[in-house]
Image (tube, rainbow, N blue to C red):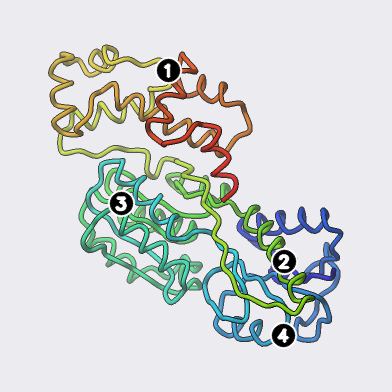
Amino acid sequence: MNIALCMGINDYYEHGIARGVVRFAKEKGWNLSGYGWMFGRLDDITGWDGDGIITRIESSTDADLFAGLGKPVVDVAGAYSRSAFCQVNNDDYLTGRKAGLHLKERGFSNYAFCGVEKVGWSKKRRMGFADATGAEEIPVFERSLEWWEELDRSESLNEWLLTLPQPGAVFACNDTAGVKLTSVCRQLGISVPAGLAILGVDNEDILCELAEPALSSVQLDCEQIGYRAAELLESLLTRRSHGQTYTSEILVRPKGIAERESTRIFVSPDPLIREAVNYIRTSARRGLGVREVAEYLNVSRRTLEMRFRRVLGRSIHEEIILSRLGFAEKRLISSNITVEAVALEAGFGSIQRFHAGFKEKNGMTPGEFRNRGRRG
């Protein structure tokens, strides 16, 4: 089969998509055409005489163009939809929910959202974020994708950020917006994360690490999106050869949160609880116990336990276990080490206790959790 991959492969997202498509193409013996020396030459898609297309559609003009080609098309952007092409997308609503839950777990009650206007994926991330936080009304700042990419354009963003209550948390629809937010906050003298915590999407590692402070980000499974897109396109071509056509959308689950300094904080009106939780979340994997937490804070165990339950509704020990489980969840999705090794890294001395605690929290075993996260 002759397949066109219509994207520039210029960013982290497209690199992941291309890896998935190429992996499937090698398995099936596809001939790939695209823009660049590594593919068969593709000058003009309107004159290309191939079998099917995988593309990233980011404008209504391009959506109309690809919809009118009369070939099977699978879009991997999720910005614009047409009945004439299918889509394999990141689950953007779930991405927003994960972001909201991550920031809510850090004790925030004030939230805001920065997005790209008039595109579906940004809107869905905003909806999931709002639903997860439970906030009645979330301040929203939206501009075009091109606006976010121009670092010297920020006057309106400056004014908007200064209206936000602190401490607060801002969910940026992608890492480009997130990095711009960290830069503007630094210029305005807004402390990140103490004043405003910032969370992005895509986990473009170089970009995130170069931000000041380093940017936390929701990690997408781009390679899985690319592989599933190629898989769907083959199915479309097979059905087409039998005179069958249909439209479809496949959603791929995001992997989880890559946490860095921009959200590594816990906020609470009680300074003792705030310090306790921050200490637990940085030290739980070192065999930390309740006595050590009380000693670190120089307070009686009974006093700490009572205030902890009053503020958070759970015990210190439960917070320690939750912190270890949270770390284990991230490692199960992001690594290939054994479940037993994950349990040890997370600070569990007993694999049986790890399995029991994990199943109680997630309703499934660690192995099932890992498999579900990788299937999308």
Q: Residues within 10 Å of mark 3 (few under 14, many from 20)?
A: many
The disc label shown at residue 70, or none: 4
Q: Give the quarter of the image for residue 338.
A: top right
Towards the viewer: 186 or 114: 114
Q: Are marks 2 and 4 in contact (CB under 8 Å)?
A: no
Q: Position of residue 9 (x, y in %)?
A: 69, 63
Q: Are marks 2 and 1 in contact (CB under 8 Å)?
A: no
Q: Which residue is mark 2?
A: 235
Q: For the point 83% across and 55% down, which residue is it?
A: 26
Q: Give the quarter of the image for residue 276.
A: top left
Q: For the point 28% across and 43% down, which residue is it?
A: 194
Disc 4 residue type (three-letter)? Gly
Label 3: which secondary element: strand
Disc 1 residue type (three-letter)? Arg
Q: Which residue is mark 1?
A: 286
Spatial separation of the CA atoms under disc 2 and disc 4: 16 Å
Towards the viewer: 323 or 190: 323
Q: For the point 84% across and 81% down, which residue is it?
A: 49
Q: Is residue 28 left or right of residue 248?
A: right
Quadrant where the N terminus sits is bottom right
Q: Which residue is mark 3?
A: 169
Spatial separation of the CA atoms under disc 2 and disc 1: 49 Å
Q: Is residue 23 left or right of residue 310?
A: right
Q: Residues within 10 Å of mark 4 (few under 14, many from 20)?
A: few
Q: Earlier in the sequence, mark 3 or mark 4?
A: 4
Q: Earlier in the sequence, mark 2 or mark 4?
A: 4
The relative height of residue 147 versus residue 269 in the rendered view (above or below) is below
